[in-house]
Each structure stands twice: as structure tokens, then as C-alpha cells.
Image: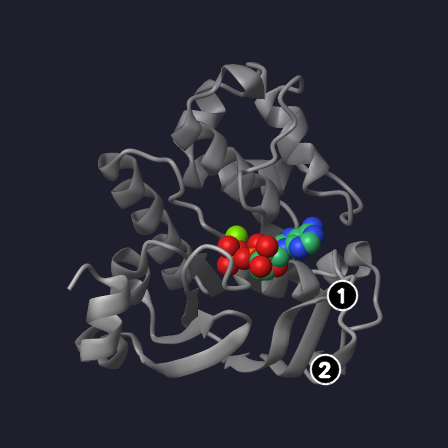
Amino acid sequence: MLKVNDLNVYYGAIHAIKGVSFQVNEGEIVTLIGANGAGKSTTLNTVSGLLRSRSGSILFQDEDLSHLPAYKIVSKGLALVPEGRRVFLQMTVEENLEMGAFTQSGSLDPALEQVYAQFPRLKERRRQVAGTLSGGEQQMLAMGRALMSSPKLLMLDEPSMGLAPILVEQIFEIIQNLHRAGTTILLVEQNAQAALSVADRGYVLETGKVVSSGTGAELMASPEIKKAYLGG
Ligand SMILES: Nc1ncnc2c1ncn2[C@@H]1O[C@H](COP(=O)(O)OP(=O)(O)O)[C@@H](O)[C@H]1O
Ligand SMILES: [Mg+2]
């Protein structure tokens, strides 16, 4: 479904992504794990069209996205839940969700109902401004907003960041529900344990390079990965 090949991304003189290649097959949950600064967000932001690569290709269903603007990439069926949620704090929950549907024409009601079915908490708070939501609720809102475009591939950038363990568990349950409902998922996490335990496959990023890849189970069993990412 998504095939990233030999991607190179720079911030000025800084070579942040150095020849990264990976793929996501339809129906999979694939995770990119790595320490802070490894290049996870840069990779997702480049696939989303928010950053430009210097070279390499990003094929989505055999179409090269690497020169398309971000809004066109959303309309092709990719949606990003950005790091740090980035919800619109002064807008209501429902207004935030409507922003996620900017590529859709016609009534937004069916999409809203689907999101509210997945996140009853958001429905209860539909008229509340997003700035008054808890961190976990804001994460749900950011996910709901991305789902408003009915993406084929949902990309999540550190959805568990800053959340209490019980909420991390809830967010991962929701990710698995979305996956069971047919959404393909590319998940970026510093919480390698949680990510590898739900992922079909994973890639390990270190300073802008893929240094290891395998099934979730293979990566979790690897002594180096245990030592570096799973707390021994
Ligand atoms: N806007 C930026 N300007 C310059 N360097 C950046 C910028 N954003 C990220 N970087 C650098 O790029 C590298 C990868 O960062 P990032 O993709 O945010 O990593 P991760 O998401 O894995 O923590 C890091 O060395 C980081 O310092
Ligand atoms: Mg990041």
C-alpha cells in the first residue's frame, strides 16, 4: 500500500533521514520505533507532504506522492495524527472534527456518527472547547479528526506520549479496533513495548537510518532491541 524507497530529508545542512526504506501492506499495523531524535516524525511528516524529501520515492497505491501538497495526500486516503495532538484549542470538539473533513463534500453527519460511535466520550463533549479536554481526550480528538477523512492509511505519531498507563492502554485498544475495522496503520512510538506488541511488523530507526526490521515478535525477542528499547 505504501512503499517508501531510499528517502533522504534535510533540515538545511542537517541530513535527518538517510536513505530510509520501508513498506506497509494493506491491512497491516506497522511500527517505526526509535529514540528521541531518530527521525520518526520527520519520516511521517514527509510522507504526509508537510516536509519535502531531497530524494527517494513515496509510493501510495503505486502513485508517487513525493511532489504532492499535503491536502492532496489527505484526499488520496492518508491521514496523520501529529505528534503532540495539535488540536484547535479554542474550537469545540465537533468543530475540530469538521476540520478533519476538509477534503469531503456533502454531509459530514455520517462521518461524525462513525467517529462518535468509536469515541463516545467525544460525543458527550461535542460542544465543549478542545482546550478543556484532558490529554487522553485530546488524543482521541486528534485521532477522530484524522478519521473524518475516512483514510485508508492512518499514521499516528506518538499517540501515547504523556499519557497515564491506563490511557495508553485505551489508546492502543482503539488502534487495534480501527485496525480490525479495516484501517491500515503506520504507528510511530517511543513506547516500543506497546507498539511492538500490537504491530505485525516493525522497523527500528537510529539517527535517520533503518537499522533493523522484522515482525513485532521477532523484534521483541531480539537481545539488542530488548537492551536498547525494552528496558533490558
Ligand atoms: N525543524 C527542524 N530543524 C532542524 N532540525 C530538526 C527539525 N526537526 C527535527 N530536526 C532534527 O532531525 C532529527 C530527527 O528529528 P525527529 O524526526 O523529530 O525525530 P523523532 O520524531 O524520532 O524524535 C533530529 O536530529 C532533530 O534534531
Ligand atoms: Mg517525533
Residue 58 sits above or below residue 230 on the image: below
The label shown at residue 57 is 2
Q: Quadrant of residue 69?
A: bottom right
Q: Quadrant of the C terminus?
A: bottom left
Q: Residue 31, percent across and down?
A: 42, 67
Q: In the visual, does 115 lie left or right of 100?
A: left
Front-most of 78 and 210?
210
The label shown at residue 50 is none
Colour setup of the view: one colour
Front-most of 13 and 180?
13
Q: Quadrant of ligand 1?
A: bottom right
- Graded by Cα atoms within 10 Å as few (under 14), some (14 to 19) or many (20 or more), the crowding at tag 1 reads few
Residue 105 showing in the rendered view: yes
Distance from mark 2 CB to nearest ligand 1 atom below 8 Å: no
Q: Residue at x 77, y 43 (%)?
A: 102
Q: In the visual, does 101 lie left or right of 81?
A: right
Residue 151 showing in the rendered view: no
Q: Amino acid at mark 2?
A: Ser
Q: Residue 48, percent across and down?
A: 69, 60
Q: Residue at x 60, y 40 (%)?
A: 145
Q: Residue 193, percent across and down?
A: 25, 60
Q: Amino acid at mark 1?
A: Ala
- Mark 2 vs mark 1, CA separation in Å: 21 Å
Q: Quadrant of residue 59?
A: bottom right
Q: Residue furthest front?
A: 13
How many marks on residues? 2
Q: Nearer the viewer, mark 2 or mark 1?
A: 1
Q: Residue 57, percent across and down?
A: 72, 82
